[in-house]
Each structure stands twice: as C-alpha cells, then as structure tokens.
Image (cartoon, rainbow, N blue to C red):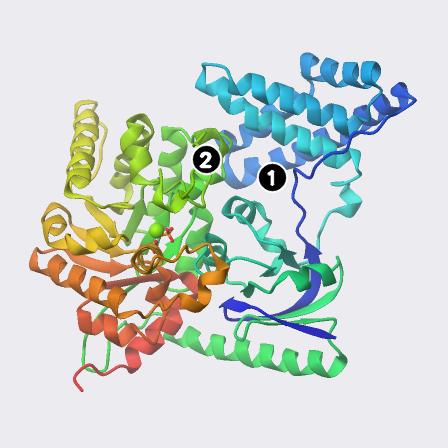
Amino acid sequence: MRTYQGKGVYGAIAIGRISVFKRQDAKVRRTHVDDASQEIARVEAAKELATQQLQEIYEKALKEVGETHAQIFEVHMMMLEDDDYNDSIRNLIETQSVNAEYAVATTADNFSEMFASMDDAYMQARAADVKDISNRLIACLGGAGNAKDKQTEKMIVCADDLAPSETVSLDKDLVMAFVTAYGSSNSHTAILARNMNIPAVIGVGEEFLKAIADGMQIIVDGYTGEIILEPDEDTVAKMSKKQQDDLRKKALLQELKGKENVTLDGTKVQIFANIGGVSGVGAVLANDAGGIGLFRSEFLYLESEDYPSEEEQFLAYRKVLESMAGKKVIIRTLDIGADKQIDYFKLDKEENPALGFRAIRICLTRPEIFKTQLRALYRASAYGKLGIMFPMITSVSEVKKILEICEEVKAQLREAGVPFDEKAEVGIMIETPAAAVISDLLAPLVNFFSVGTNDLTQYTLAIDRQNAKLEPFCDTHHEAILRLIKMAADNAHQHGAWIGICGELAADTSLTETFLRMGIDELSVSAPFVLPLRDTVRKLDLSK
Ligand code: PEP
Ligand code: MG
C-alpha cells in the first residue's frame, strides 16, 4: 500500500481499478521488415477491424446524436477505402521494406499536409480526419481496439494530464474517477470532472505515474486529495464506509429539490448550472437547477471534426432550450484558444496563449464563424428563454462591435421571416480586470454580467490557471478579486442589469454570504453543487 497526495477538485470517493490513459498519437517506430506481403496482410486485417469499429461508432452516434453528427464516421469508412491512401501505404512497405505502422503514419503525415495546404476550407479540415483514421489503423495494427480488449468495466482513469479535448472524448459511463499527475484545479479538465459528478484529484506528482499500471486497485478521495495505491483490507473497509456515509449525506440533499433558494431573512438568489453540451442537461434537471447560467458552446466545436454548421448548432441549442422548458439558458459564444485548442481553427502557436488570440478576439477577427453561431443562437431563441453571453471582454468598443453584429444577424433573420426572440438578453462575462474596472461603462450596453472567476483570478493575480506549481500562490479569496466583483455588481445594478457568477468560485459555500451581501442575483455552478449551495443559502441569515 502506498499513498500519494494531490488536490481534490470534486468531493466524492471512488474505489476501483486503474486504467492508464493512452494517448492515441503515440510515436510510431520505423523497423525493417523482410516479408512485405505479410506486412500488407496485417494492414488488410487492421483495416477490417477499423471498419468494424467505425460501423459500430456510426450506429451508436446515429442513435445518440443523429444523422448529421454520425455522417463523419461514414466519411472515415470511405477514407479507409481510398485507393490513393491504400496505394501509398502499400508502396512504402514494398519499396522501403518498412513496418505497417510506419507506412500508415508516414502516409497520414503526407496526406494531412497535402489537405492542410489546399485552399478549400472543407478539404483543409480533412487533414484531421486522415490523422484520425490512421491513428485508429495503427491502434488496430497493435491489436488495440479489439472487441475483446474493449473496456466494459468502470475504471479510474490515471494520466499525466488531460487536455479538454481528451477529457470530452472519454466514455463518461466508463470513468469512475480521474487522477492526474499534473494539472491545476482551475483547468477545464478539473471543471469537466466537476460537471461529470465524479471524484477527481489532480497534481499527484510524477512518482505516482511511475508506480501505476493497468488493473491496480486504487482509492481516490476527492475530499482530501489522498490517493491510495494497492490498499490493504482495513483501508478498503474504512474508505468504503466513508464512501457510504458520503452517499447518504448526498441523498439527504435530495430533499431540497423543489425548495426555494431563499435565506432565513427572505433574500432570494437564482441557482443555475453550467454545462458543456446537450448531454449535460440531464444533470441540470436532476439537480433541480433554476436554469443554465453557462453553456460553454466551444465544446460543440471541440467535439467536432470540423466547424459545426449553423444547422448543427441550431439543433443543439434548440434541444437545450426545449429541454429547459422556459427556464433561462445562457449560452456563451465560442471561447476557443488558450488551453482549448482545435486543430481545424489552425491557430498559430503563441508564447502566452492565455493572453493571446482567444474567445471574442477570434470571433471579431473571423466574423463568418461568429455570425454562423449567432444565427444559430437567434434561431434557437424562438424555442425558450435564451441569453447570449460574450467571453473575454476588455473594452466598450468590443461590446459595441458585438452588438452591431447581433443587430445585423437579427435584421437578416427578420428579412428572411425566420422567427426569433426579439427580447433575447445579451450579456458579457466579467473575467478580465479591465471589464470589472470599466463595468460602469459596460453595464448600460447589456442586460447582464456574469463573472468568470476562473479567468478573473488568473488575470488579476497574474497566475496562469494551467500551472500547477502556482497553486500555493492562488488565493481565490483575494481581496482584489472580491473588490472587482463588488464593483461589477454595484455598476450592474446602477444601470438596471443583473449579475451572476459562473466561475468555479460560485460553488465555494464559504463565500456565499459575501456574494449575497454584494447583491449577486445568480450563482451558476456544476450541477452536483446546486443542492449543496441551496442548503447553504437556506441556512444564511443576512439580517444579522
Ligand atoms: C471563467 O473564466 O470563470 C469561466 C467561467 O470561463 P472558463 O472557465 O470556461 O474560462
Ligand atoms: Mg473564462
């Protein structure tokens, strides 16, 4: 038995077996082969297996996300059969006497570069597809992905670190907990773990990585951040009891469903939930949130192989709005860049990505992407109570430009006779110190503010939210942050706007009283935090 200490980012306990996270694009080694025909036969067998897997994924996607999203897997199956692609693999094996894996990887590099250099945006996006099918083929060559090897049991995923795109690609039904050697508690991976309602511990350290292997027993305590590898019987018994007590306590909170978010002295606050996609709505409803305070729309883009079309986006937004049946849904426009990178956006590498080309800066520079999303959003507004929110605001001119583009999109829809909600609210995120400081100038322009404390903390304290080493310096209760929030709240109210908080700090119950005293109107948290927050609110007395 060995113990390791990390930082718990979602309080819950898991006892299970390890699945070491494997990155798909592991480096392929070049080896010499004597028998080319045997190597070509291996490629053929791997292709058959890959096609079988793609067919299964296609059928699953068809059922779960519909024809439009499923189509990409049909395209992948066709690409696997492409003559040029297959000739290239065969030629490399025959003329260079190289192993099948190397021939596939080299073909993938050549083809993806060729696609990437084309003028046509559709063809450029195919570069990622070639890489994807080739990675699958390489995995199949190694026997990976064989139906017999497929994980069917819930496991505890252990990794060095997980990028947001890697986290979303995991099968949520098969992940019991996360443990990462690196990572910080404000990272999107940590946020996703909270949204998924599973215990997660990050920053456990490098030694842990060296000690683990697939199938080892492990206990994850998301409350204390403690990790126990190969626990003895007594420890398993003690932690199972802690787990049961925890589940009982959480079950008691269920009694708060249907109750108001009101303090003992009668102050009311809205408690909403954050989601990253359509699939998050179930947890929002199950936890009785009053609405959705932040739909991180960029996850639609992250889960996609190419720019999601207006229609695809419209269907996703409409589904969320319809499911929420008239409750408020705040959808944030694309916040890509920094830690959320997407190949098909082809963003340049930057020295300081968090201070770089991200979010609204991309949207204002590439208005065609922005307008597509806005059209989808306004069309969806006819199906519920939509609020549209813009991220990373720093200036009045940005907001004026955004509003101009919104008016342009609305005018086009009006002219085309497409129904939309003329009263759909628009709001901005207060997540830069600049936005908080000029909130008196911004408030008259919008209906609401929503404070993104994750970035506001990063930019106010000059602490990279991705850097685990800085955790000891990251005082999330820093007076500077609280003053900026108070300033934004006062300015919002003075100009008739409402203000919410949608960053992770909204779930910190040690600050709930402070936020309510500031007059914060809405707190939006990961769905599993809705009821604990309601519990806290109902025990507060602000008259004292
Ligand atoms: C924030 O910055 O607090 C926020 C809610 O946005 P994100 O975490 O997605 O950057
Ligand atoms: Mg942010």
User: The C terminus is located in which quarter?
Assistant: bottom left
Q: Which mark is residue 349?
A: 2
Is 317 situated above or below 369? below
Residue at the limit of the structure toward the right, as seen here: 34
Q: Earlier in the sequence, mark 1 or mark 2?
A: 1
Task: Evaluate whether residue 195 shows in this view.
Answer: yes
Label 1, on which residue? 60
The image shows a total of numbered marks equal to 2
| Amino acid marked by disc 1 | Lys
Residue at screen point 59% across, 29% down: 73
Residue at screen point 62% across, 29% down: 131
Residue at screen point 47% across, 49% down: 279
- The answer to whether residue 211 is left or right of residue 310 is right
Is 526 situated above or below 140? below
- The answer to whether residue 525 is left or right of residue 94 is left
| Amino acid marked by disc 2 | Lys
- Pointer 1 residue Cβ closer than 8 Å to ligand 1: no
Q: From the viewer's side, name the closer residue of 111 and 314.
A: 111
Which element is circle 2 on? Answer: loop
The image shows residue 389 at horizontal and vertical percentages of 26, 46
Is 34 situated above or below 446? above
Tag nearer the camera, 1 or 2 = 2
Q: Which mark is residue 535?
A: none
